[in-house]
Amino acid sequence: MSTGPDTAAPGSPAPGETGVPGPEGTEPPKPAKGKKPKSFWKELPLLIGIALILALVIKTFLVQAFSIPSDSMQNTLQQGDRVLVDKLTPWFGSEPERGEVVVFKDPGHWLDGEPTPDPNAVQKVLGWIGLMPSADEKDLIKRVIAVGGDTVECKGTGPVKVNGKALNEKNYVFEGNTPCTVDDQGGQFKVTVPKGKIWVMGDHRQNSLDSRYHQNQPGGGAVPVDNVVGRAFVIAWPPTRWGTLPVPDTFDQPGISQAMSAAPAALGLAGALPIVLWRRRRVAARLDSVPATRVSGGGTAG
């Protein structure tokens, strides 16, 4: 059986297919050759470099891991816990608030006599980029009890008072501890915190060399806000200890903040001032419109 000019014989490739000239006798286009993908091992150094840069940026500006080296924050934090610290909000002007757990740089001689870790080369590199807690930085972790302008005090065994308000610290102070320590080394105190500083205390009150025990040093035991690295907001390791670090409710009680208690009065004064000035102008204008009255002898003006 013969075939027409426009039909292909059974089993033969159609015009335009590979190896068969098109209707005009031209060669069909050859398939484009794709680029050969790079070897994984060649791309690995680039991936590692990007990961290291991202880790360094995160550690510097966002979040950093810290290891708890002592028992001064029990039972909130245990020795060996790893916490994540928020380093972002301070870049936007946020300052430490009462009740927060913060990491701060040694304001001066707080860590004298403490053993210095001796990390190996790998630990130093990983600590530098933030993939593991740094062993070289001299940082401490405590709870903020009072901020600049507050008066904080503790007599006898407690309670601690901030601006005259007693703190209920049962939820975070180590079981069996008293809020204050009866001694003459700093356990009994009454301090007005300077502006730009914070007063910090450990949750394990009888095992914490905190602001109370550095009052004889420059700064009177208060820590400069500029020394604060950031707020610890979560326990990240070990998994059995995972949890957040919220601000206890006792720091939210009415009247504890002098600034907040003074705000209504200040707003009231600011609102009343224009009214007082307006009223005085009206009275002055009214007096100017009344003719002067002569008073003679010992009479009185009506």
Image (spheres, rainbow, N blue to C red):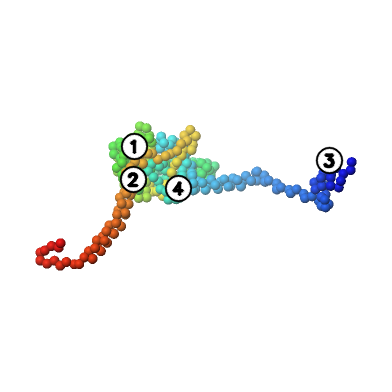
Question: Residue type at mark 4?
Answer: Thr
Residue 32 placement (x, y as % from top left): 74, 49
1 or 4: tag closer to the N-terminus = 4
Element carrying mark 4:
helix
Which disc is residue 148 wearing?
none
SS for tag 1? Answer: loop
Image quarter (top left, top right, bottom left or bottom right) of the N terminus: top right
Q: Are marks 1 and 4 in contact (CB under 8 Å)?
A: no
Q: Which residue is mark 2?
A: 257
Q: CA distance from mark 4 to mark 3?
A: 73 Å
Residue 168's tag is: 1
Q: Is residue 297 above or below residue 243?
A: below
Question: Can you say whether 275 is above or below 173 in the image?
Answer: below
Tag 4 residue? 89
Asked whether the residues under the numbered discs 4 and 3 touch, taking CB atoms below 8 Å apart as contact, a structural biologist would say no
Residue denoted by label 3: 11
Percent coordinates x, y for residue 200 in the rendering: 37, 43
